[in-house]
Amino acid sequence: MEEAVKDTKNTTIGKPEKKRFRLRYSKWVVKNIPFYFFAGGLMIFYIANGHYADKLVRNISLTEKHLKEIEFEYKTVKRDVMFRSKESELAKAVEPLGLQQLVVPPVLIRDTLQK
């Protein structure tokens, strides 16, 4: 029976202290709510910034890939134009039309009215 009295004494003594601690703790939490909102806002901003950066990196990578493809196409077309514009290739291309290279140099026409 003495043990039961001791248990009741310890629990009755401890309860008011726990209440005070809870009351102080809840006041502290309420007092710091603006800071929690600020910290939450910063976290949301940080996460959104990370997503934006990832999206931007993906877009840059896609653009670089597209640019390399276009650059390759440009070099291929330029090579073909350079090859086809050679004099021998040009002569081969216009031969079916009946055109031939000049054997004699062109005649220079001068204006007789000039002094």
Image (cartoon, rainbow, N blue to C red):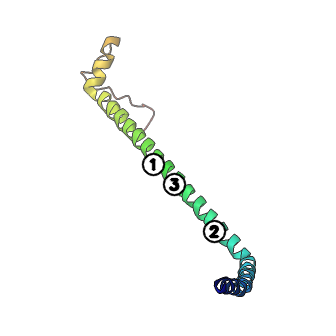
Q: Which residue is mark 2?
A: 42
> Pointer 3: residues within 10 angstroms few (<14), some, or many (20+)?
few
Foreground mark, 3 or 2, reads: 2
| Mark 1 vs 3, N-terminal side | 3
Q: Which residue is mark 1?
A: 61
Q: Is residue 47 visible from the viewing direction of this image?
A: yes
Q: Is residue 101 visible from the viewing direction of this image?
A: no
Q: Estimate the x, y position of residue 3 in percent, counting from the top left.
A: 64, 84
| Mark 3 vs 2, N-terminal side | 2
Q: How many labels were placed on the picture? A: 3
Image-quadrant location for residue 96: top left
Judging depth in this view, the residue of 51 and 102 nearest the camera is: 51
Q: Is residue 74 above or below residue 90?
A: below
- In what element is the residue under mark 2? helix
Which residue type does callout 1 highlight?
A: Ser
Question: Which numbered tag is attached to residue 81?
Answer: none
Task: Report the Cα–Cα distance between label 1 and label 3.
Answer: 11 Å
The residue at 39%/31% (across/down) is: 110
Task: Report the Cα–Cα distance between label 3 and label 2.
Answer: 18 Å
Which residue type does callout 2 highlight?
A: Leu
Judging depth in this view, the residue of 102 and 84 nearest the camera is: 84
The residue at 66%/67% (across/down) is: 40
| Mark 1 vs 2, N-terminal side | 2
Question: Which numbered tag is attached to residue 54?
Answer: 3
Name the image quarter holding the C terminus.
top left
Judged left or right of residue 56, residue 100 is left
